[in-house]
Image (cartoon, grey):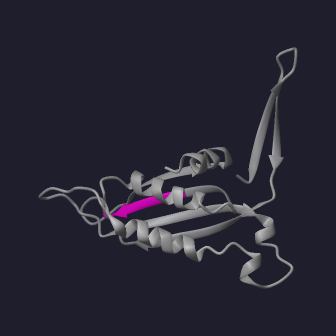
Amino acid sequence: MANDARASCDTEGTWTLEVLVSNSSTVELKNLLIKADIGTYGPGDVVPDEHVLDLTLWISQTLVLVTEDGMQHVFDYDPLVAAIDHLAAETHYETQERLMTRIVSACARHPEIEAVEIALRKSPVRRGTGSLGVRTHVDKAVLATIRRQAL
């Protein structure tokens, strides 16, 4: 969400793309091992040892470039991390996507968050190697819809 774009077409059919630079900053949570029970596995299937979360949150620069030191001037991500821990541990998930959806919904409950990119991966995938994951970016418009619908 660092940049938004606006396209327009004039009367002669010429398209113009205008890039709008926003004043957003990001909070990045990387390589967080979460305790989640995801998937259903049969005999001989490789069962993942770990699930790893990457989360990038776009927030206003006013919550990063502060004139005073203090938690009241910044985005406090600790409650969100605690909510993610709770969501991951509270139930069995058939899919990574459902847990990701619930984490994005938790992000939507924080009005300071303007957009989200989330990736969740598991490993190993085969013979003790590899990771397999899902990633999505949720922009301001989609986040607003989620806030209205409360997924």
34 left or right of 41?
right
Image spot of residue 77 (x, y percent) = 61, 73
Q: Is residue 36 something that shows in the picture?
A: no
In this rendering, does residue 53 appear at all? yes
Residue 33 locus on image (x, y percent): 42, 73
Above or below — where is 4 with respect to 124?
A: above
Q: Is residue 117 above or below residue 86?
A: above
Q: Which region of the structure is painted magenta?
A: 118-124
Q: Residue furthest left?
A: 43
Q: Residue at x 59, y 57 (%)?
A: 108
Is 109 or 101 nearer to us in this picture?
109
Q: Nearer the viewer, residue 106 or 62?
A: 106
The residue sitting at the bottom extreme is 69
Magenta highlight: main SS: strand
Eyeballing the image, is 85 above or below 99? below
Task: Determine the image quadrant of residue 117.
Answer: bottom right
Residue ranking furthest to the top? 12
Question: How many numbered markers are drawn?
Answer: 0
Asked if the stretch drawn in magenta spans residue 61, the answer is: no
Q: Quadrant of residue 90?
A: bottom left
| Residue appearing at x 76%, y 49% in the figure | 3
Q: Position of residue 126 (x, y in %)?
A: 26, 59
| Residue 120 shown in magenta | yes
Residue 140 placed where, x, y %? 67, 49
Q: Quadrant of residue 72?
A: bottom right
In screen coordinates, is 13 left or right of 118?
right
Q: Decide: is 142 above or below 50.
A: above
In this rendered view, identify the residue nearer to me: 63 or 32: 63
In the drawing, does residue 36 fall left or right of residue 108?
left
